């Protein structure tokens, strides 16, 4: 069970986690450089743009008093606005650089001052960066070294771009590594390769910021740090098992999950009293029997899809090949278990995995172009089938964040199920309240490390929603959070292929007849396997659905209903939302903000610039977009041409604005912060 690790300044071994191991040996301070950028604004819909301009909730140059961003709409100048590119470099003389900032930069208010916290990743090692949110600017405050050299954010999906030397440090986590407690303690996963330590690291921000509110040299950062962790078995390493996610459920307690589906409840005041629920336990009969029953269901589902001549949803065409000589069988063989059912011969000599993405059907889809076909069929990123009969696929795994409701109960999504857990403090145990298997096509998508659903659970009112792992289309499913009953399911982005790696965005409002109307927005990430590609030909997309909750006894639940007008408009306008989760402003003139790449054309194959785009929440019509720009001479860069080509072969100056799967955010003043290559960009709400 987890315990509190004590620092021992007299020891030099990593097993004792000394101050030097945590903060010195891993510490080449990164340098934050501010570079001015400009944005060109293009108004697409003058009527909607004027409506925003007249809205009482609009952000203006003289309106910087309110901290409630939910009541403000971002309104750019019609010409251009000033912005800042915060580039993160290695220390002077070190020809290394980070390729991005972590996905979930968070805000923390201390003594009426708002701070922005984020993690820079890459081969500069991990660093926690702290900024003050000032008027039209972020001011660098300080940084903490974090053991490890790379969280699993978007850049790790193209790891050959990184020089990742062998190291005693390792840090593997989900895409949301930062967690803040109300006590002012910042938590994040810590997984150290040598010594097999896994756990969480805590920084006392309240104390630190009280003593060092500005950019000051700090000699004793270890005084503000604690580590809570446990050793792995000698037979395991942190590559096999590591802390995946953290989520608070009261002022002192947190939920922790590992990639191997261990769920932990930890009170940081009493770390030796942590409680564990192992979803893969072979010693507790109630857990083992439940998992065995689940695997039996998965086998039946797999057989129905692939071994009993039933094809996946959609128009799929298969061919049979002999596993002995790989000759094609023209008709369906009698004994199908001795044959492979595939779409191509690319899986030749591989009896466990098989590509079944039919090339002919892909070519019929207007948004899947030659480039994507080349990547899928070059053997680098084939779509693969994972058979639940293989022992490696018969364990729960967790890749998503933990979602906690108002009661402190946790909702965790594994590769096969969504489950609800509660912590019973008096009984001293964690209980699984319910679990439900979601639709799984057993397909490993490009850019995915395993067969998982793409979204963490989203809790709203008495419901919890996820997207599943269907193929060629995923579905949005809504469950009753009390008993786990599936209330409604809706196929997403029909007529194309879909994959949802972003969060589901939910907005709830009162409607007629004393009912509550929940609006759910989902984006399509299918095909976005390589975040640093020059041009992405996948269409992406965005859709909106309604789910009504009636407080009367006559009709309590209604099914998901598509907003056909919004969805069709977004489709017609080729709205592309492949990277950052959309942001929603719901006051006055409602606006959806997305950060995307402009549409590229096959004929030109030219670089498509990145942009912040505003979409009308009601209709799906684009309102305006703003494109960041930086002058070549202003961006002083010490990297050689070879290193620059790792980011862009053709247009390095614009490629630095690539979002690489990082979620953008808005400061309490309404300013935008977007993680990009080499750092992040800051877009203030004030016009020039």
Image: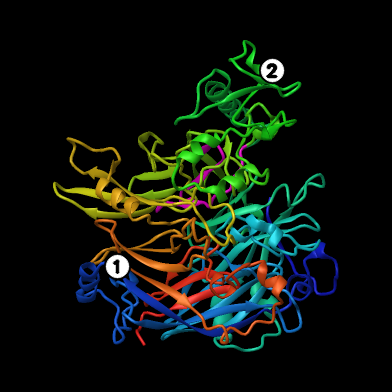
Task: Point out residue 580 in the picture as x, y percentages from the top left corner.
Answer: 47, 60
Residue 413 in magenta? yes
Task: Point out residue 653 in the picture as x, y percentages from the top left corner.
Answer: 56, 76
Q: Quadrant of residue 591?
A: bottom left
Disc sitting over residue 510 in the figure? none
Q: Main secondary structure of the magenta part?
A: loop
On the rendered image, what quadrant is the C terminus found in? bottom left
Relative depth, front residue between 364 and 677? 364
Which residue does the numbered mark 2 point to in the structure image? 338
- 361 w.r.t. 687: above or below: above
**Segment tinted magenta in the rendering:** 396-417
Residue 162 appears in the figure:
yes
Q: Residue at x 31, y 49 (%)?
A: 567
| Mark 1 surroundings: few (<14), some (14-19) or many (≥20) residues within 10 A | some
| Mark 2 surroundings: few (<14), some (14-19) or many (≥20) residues within 10 A | few
Task: Point out residue 121 in the picture as x, y percentages from the top left corner.
Answer: 64, 67
Relative depth, front residue between 121 and 677? 677
Which residue does the numbered mark 1 point to in the structure image? 44
Q: Nearer the viewer, mark 1 or mark 2?
A: 1
Q: Residue furthest front?
A: 603
Q: Residue furthest top?
A: 334
Residue 418 appears in the figure:
no
């Amino acid at each position: 069970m987890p315990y509190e690790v004590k620092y021992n300044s007299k020891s030099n071994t990593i097993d004792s986690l000394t101050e030097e191991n945590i903060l010195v040996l891993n510490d080449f301070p990164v340098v934050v450089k501010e570079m001015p950028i400009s944005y060109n604004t293009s108004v697409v819909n003058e009527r909607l743009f004027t409506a925003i301009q007249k809205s009482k909730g609009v952000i203006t140059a003289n309106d910087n008093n309110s901290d409630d961003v939910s009541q403000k709409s971002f309104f750019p100048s019609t010409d251009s606005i000033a912005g800042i590119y915060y580039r993160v470099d290695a220390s002077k003389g070190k020809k290394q650089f980070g390729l991005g900032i972590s996905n979930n930069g968070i805000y923390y208010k201390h003594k009426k001052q708002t701070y922005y916290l984020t993690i820079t990743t890459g081969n500069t090692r991990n660093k926690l960066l702290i900024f003050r949110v000032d008027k039209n600017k972020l001011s660098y405050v300080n940084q903490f070294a974090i053991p490890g050299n790379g969280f699993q954010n978007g850049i790790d999906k193209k790891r050959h771009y990184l020089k990742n030397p062998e190291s005693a440090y390792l840090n593997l986590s989900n895409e949301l590594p930062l967690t803040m407690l109300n006590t002012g303690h910042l938590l994040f996963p810590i997984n150290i390769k040598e010594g097999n330590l896994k756990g969480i690291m805590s920084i006392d921000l309240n104390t630190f910021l009280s003593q060092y509110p500005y950019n000051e040299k700090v000699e004793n950062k270890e005084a503000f740090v604690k580590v809570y962790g446990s050793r792995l078995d000698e037979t395991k390493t942190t590559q096999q098992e590591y802390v995946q996610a953290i989520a608070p459920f009261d002022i002192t307690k947190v939920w922790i999950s590992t990639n191997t589906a261990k769920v932990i409840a930890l009170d940081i005041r009493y770390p030796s009293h942590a409680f564990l629920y192992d979803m893969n336990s072979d010693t507790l009969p109630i857990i083992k029997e439940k998992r065995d029953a689940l695997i039996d269901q998965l086998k039946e589902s797999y057989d129905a899809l692939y071994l009993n001549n039933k094809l996946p949803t959609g128009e799929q065409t298969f061919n049979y090949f002999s596993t002995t000589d790989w000759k094609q069988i023209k008709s369906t063989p009698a004994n199908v278990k001795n044959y492979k059912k595939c779409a191509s011969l690319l899986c030749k000599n591989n009896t466990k995995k098989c590509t079944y993405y039919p090339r002919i059907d892909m070519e019929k889809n207007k948004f899947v172009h030659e480039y994507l076909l080349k990547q899928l069929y070059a053997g680098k990123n084939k779509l693969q089938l994972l058979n639940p009969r293989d022992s490696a696929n018969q364990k729960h795994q967790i890749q998503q964040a933990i979602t906690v409701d108002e009661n402190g109960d946790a909702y965790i999504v594994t590769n096969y199920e969504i489950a609800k857990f509660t912590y019973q403090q008096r009984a001293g145990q964690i209980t699984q309240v319910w679990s439900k298997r979601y639709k799984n096509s057993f397909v490993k998508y490009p850019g995915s490390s395993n067969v998982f659903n793409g979204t963490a659970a989203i809790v709203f009112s008495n419901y919890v929603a996820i997207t599943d792992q269907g193929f060629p289309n995923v579905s949005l499913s809504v469950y009753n959070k009390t008993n786990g009953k599936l209330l409604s399911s809706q196929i997403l982005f029909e007529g194309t292929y879909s994959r949802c790696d972003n969060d589901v965005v939910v907005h709830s409002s009162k409607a007629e007849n004393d009912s509550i109307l929940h609006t759910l927005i989902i984006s399509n990430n299918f095909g976005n396997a390589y975040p640093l590609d020059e041009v992405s030909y996948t269409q992406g997309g965005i859709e909106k659905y309604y789910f009504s909750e009636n407080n009367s006894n006559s009709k309590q639940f209604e099914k998901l209903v598509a907003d056909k007008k919004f969805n069709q408009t977004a489709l017609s306008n080729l709205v592309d939302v492949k990277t950052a989760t959309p942001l929603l402003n719901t006051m006055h003139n409602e606006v959806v903000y997305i950060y995307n790449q402009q549409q590229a054309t096959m004929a030109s194959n030219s670089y498509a610039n990145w942009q912040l785009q505003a979409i009308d929440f009601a209709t799906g019509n684009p309102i305006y977009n703003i494109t960041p720009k930086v002058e070549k001479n202003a961006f002083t860069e010490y990297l050689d041409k070879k290193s620059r080509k790792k980011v862009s072969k053709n247009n390095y100056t614009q490629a630095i604005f690539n979002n690489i799967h990082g979620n953008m955010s808005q400061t309490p003043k309404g300013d935008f912060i977007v993680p990009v290559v080499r750092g992040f960009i800051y877009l203030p709400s004030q016009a020039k």
